[in-house]
């Protein structure tokens, strides 16, 4: 549909171009010598040109060309407003088709309608060409921004996002101005910057809460009481972080690794809760070893019961799960 409409529009430009240079109605005959048939022919040409302009503007709206070339489409819209008034007058008095448009012009009223129509069609054709260039050259960039939007990037990395978005707009304007080769030369750098931003955005989106938990645990008594467990938490989080940055769109695998990191955080919280419950009975300085021994026993039991790793649950919850399985 897009290609067909493009071809039709370009043909219209060619046809209308011929109207002014080869078939100008002012060259048919002067108005005082024109026959009714000649006047009608002039009006018909003007009407056909007007309809072509109308169709071009319809295509412009359908394809949202103003989003790609606002300057040309705005100029076409402004011309259309004036053209509508001129053609309305001509339609009301077709007999005036071969009359002079003004005292200072040799063009007829029909010529004037045709010229404005041709300019509108030419502007829309140029805007459509600009859109085609933008879509074909900048589609990877547009797609990258779509991914960034899904990761709430603009909210958390506002300045970087705005800077790259502005650069994207600059490249669009360069394409509209016909500087395709220059734009293609700038693409690798922009894509590299977008990828770096996507890495940071994906890390924050998927793993941000876990990384905050790791920092919180590091600054609490929990890391001091359970240093081995904290290292497990930290290592799992760092592994997920590294995986995200290297496989930024492997979303299923990312979610799996983030889930493992979240379970390690919950595991540490549960072990510390057990520690606090046993604190009165166990020497504080030697609390981790017996807790880990008990945890290992429960892990062996849950695996044998086919329940897998339930260390993110409290000991009592693990025992309850085992009992329910038996």
Image (tube, grey):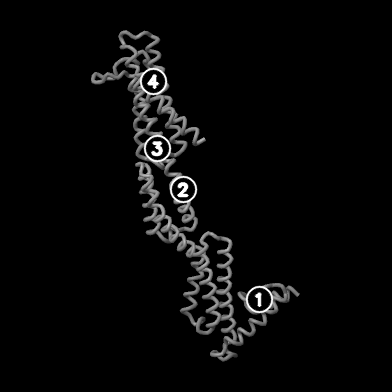
Whether the residues at callouts 2 and 3 have beta carbons within 8 Å, the answer is no
Q: Earlier in the sequence, mark 4 or mark 3?
A: 4
Q: Earlier in the sequence, mark 1 or mark 2?
A: 2
* Distance from the alpha carbon under mark 1 to that under mark 4: 85 Å
* Distance from the alpha carbon under mark 1 to that under mark 3: 66 Å
Q: Earlier in the sequence, mark 2 or mark 3?
A: 3
Specify the farthest residue to the left. 104
* Distance from the alpha carbon under mark 1 to that under mark 2: 52 Å
Q: Which residue is mark 1?
A: 317
Image position, residue 72 (x, y; %): 36, 37
Q: Earlier in the sequence, mark 1 or mark 3?
A: 3
Whether the residues at callouts 1 and 3 have beta carbons within 8 Å, the answer is no
Which numbered disc, 1 or 4, marks the residue closer to the eye?
A: 4
Label 4 SS:
helix
Q: Which residue is mark 4?
A: 46
Image position, residue 284 (x, y; %): 54, 89
Q: Which residue is mark 3?
A: 127
84 or 299, nearer to the observer: 299
Q: Which residue is mark 2?
A: 139
Image position, residue 217 (x, y; %): 49, 77
Dot 2 alpha-carbon crowd within 10 angstroms: few under 14, some 14 to 19, many 20 or more? few
* x 36%, y 18%: residue: 23
* Distance from the alpha carbon under mark 4 to that under mark 3: 23 Å
Label 3 SS:
helix
Dot 1 alpha-carbon crowd within 10 angstroms: few under 14, some 14 to 19, many 20 or more? few
């Amino acid at each position: 549909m897009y290609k067909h409409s493009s071809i039709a529009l370009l043909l219209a430009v060619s046809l209308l171009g011929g109207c002014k240079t080869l078939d100008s109605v002012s060259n048919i005959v002067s108005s005082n010598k024109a026959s009714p048939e000649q006047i009608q022919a002039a009006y018909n040409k003007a009407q056909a040109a007007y309809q072509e302009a109308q169709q071009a503007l319809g295509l412009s709206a359908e394809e949202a060309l103003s989003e790609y070339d606002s300057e040309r489409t705005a100029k076409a819209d402004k011309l259309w407003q004036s053209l509508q008034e001129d053609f309305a007058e001509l339609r009301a008095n077709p007999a005036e088709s071969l009359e002079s448009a003004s005292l200072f012009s040799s063009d007829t009223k029909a010529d004037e309608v045709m010229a404005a129509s041709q300019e509108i069609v030419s502007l829309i054709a140029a805007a459509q060409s600009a859109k085609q260039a933008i879509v074909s050259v900048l589609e990877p960039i547009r797609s990258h921004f779509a991914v960034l939007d899904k990761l709430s990037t603009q909210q958390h990395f506002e300045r970087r996002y705005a800077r790259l978005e502005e650069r994207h707009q600059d490249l669009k304007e360069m394409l509209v101005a016909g500087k395709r080769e220059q734009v293609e030369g700038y693409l690798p750098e922009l894509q590299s910057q977008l990828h770096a931003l996507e890495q940071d955005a994906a890390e924050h989106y998927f793993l941000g809460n876990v990384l905050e938990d790791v920092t919180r645990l590091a600054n609490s008594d929990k890391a001091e009481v359970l240093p081995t467990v904290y290292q497990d938490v930290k290592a799992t989080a760092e592994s997920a972080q590294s995986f995200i940055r290297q496989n930024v769109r492997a979303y299923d695998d990312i979610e799996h690794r983030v889930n493992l990191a979240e379970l390690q955080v919950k595991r540490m919280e549960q072990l510390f809760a057990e520690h606090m419950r046993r604190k009165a009975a166990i020497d504080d300085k030697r609390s981790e070893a017996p807790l880990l021994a008990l945890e290992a026993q429960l892990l062996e039991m849950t695996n044998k019961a086919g329940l897998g790793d339930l260390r993110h649950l409290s000991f009592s919850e693990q025992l309850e799960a085992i009992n329910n399985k038996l």
